[in-house]
Image: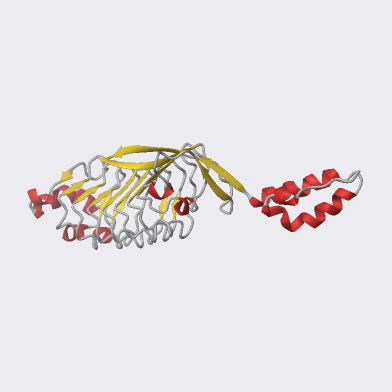
Amino acid sequence: MATYIRYGEVDGAFSFYSKKVKLLLKMENRYFLVFVLLSSVLVASGQVVLNCNYDHLSVNGAVGYGCDLKNVRVDRETDRIIVMGDHQPGMTNNDVVRLTIMNSQTGFIITQLFTQFPNLHQLEISNGGLQRIQPNAFVLARNLRSLVIQGNNLIVLQANSFNHMMVLDTLILRSNNIQLMDANTFVGLTSLRYLFINNEGIRMIQPNTFRPLTSLVMLSLGSNHIERVDAEMLVNNRQLHSVFLENNNINAIQPTIINNINSIQILSLSSNPCINHVIIPRAASSDDINEMLNKCYANWH
């Protein structure tokens, strides 16, 4: 008996193979081969369905409509992402300003989510399995104002990791096992005011790393393994008023740093091998500051 398939019911991805399938169906004992063929096309298409929990959540006093994604696993950047979930009455993807990805297993930034939610202001990736930030990952996230990445396994921040986010105000990197940062990691973040890189494994910061951050007012590098502080590290951050370097391994500071901290109101250097002080430059004379930093200066070679 002949076997027929209504091709209009088959997904568009199979149309290319329709003639081959028809011939195979006419051949005896070849049904298994048909299923193998169709399965291979399905795998190649790589569709991943993500279930979103939509809600209104107050963040720092402001109510934002958001999407929470949990237990996400996307294996390939080329996989097609389909976001499912029931919106709150009257709301659409265009109203989503907050996206949270938690307890997941995806090693890269899922860039298609920025197309699904074009008006995102806040993105948080917590315990998401993130291992790298691919080039131009945020090219479609131009409205992003706050980015939190914590509890992942990044290890290395490459050049231009956060490029294209022209209005980003706050960047929080915490407990991601970051050990290396390229000197051009923060290129493009001209609006960034608050940068937190805490509880990472950073030992060295290249002198020009923070140079692009001309709007920076607060820099927190606490609980790393930083060993030396170059005087040029903060030379271009004229609006900077708070710097936190506590709980590091700082044993040497370049003596000319005092010339580059005129705008700083708080310089926390507590719990370091060569110094255990919080310096308030406006409340202390240059001689007092030099005396507190004397041991660190002496170790600079």
Say how many tags the image has.
0
* Horizontal side of residue 153 vs 286, given as left or right: right
- Colour pattern: secondary structure
Q: Using the image as rendered, state which of residue 274 and residue 142 is in the foreground.
A: 142
Residue drawn at x 31%, y 62% as measured from the top left: 212
Can the viewer see residue 175?
no
In the picture, the quarter occupied by the N terminus is top right
Residue drawn at x 73%, y 46% as measured from the top left: 39
Percent coordinates x, y for residue 11 in the rendering: 68, 50
Percent coordinates x, y for residue 36 in the rendering: 78, 46
Can the viewer see residue 239?
yes
Seen in the picture, residue 105 relative to 11 is either above or below; the reply is above
Percent coordinates x, y for residue 136 in the rendering: 46, 60
Q: Using the image as rendered, state which of residue 239 and residue 7 is in the foreground.
A: 7
Q: Quadrant of residue 90?
A: top left
In the picture, the quarter occupied by the C terminus is bottom left
Q: Using the image as rendered, state which of residue 167 and residue 239 is in the foreground.
A: 167
Percent coordinates x, y for residue 196 in the rendering: 31, 47
Seen in the picture, residue 257 relative to 249 is either above or below; the reply is below
Residue drawn at x 40%, y 50% as measured from the top left: 94
Q: Using the image as rendered, state which of residue 227 and residue 62 is in the foreground.
A: 62
Seen in the picture, residue 301 relative to 62 is either above or below; the reply is below
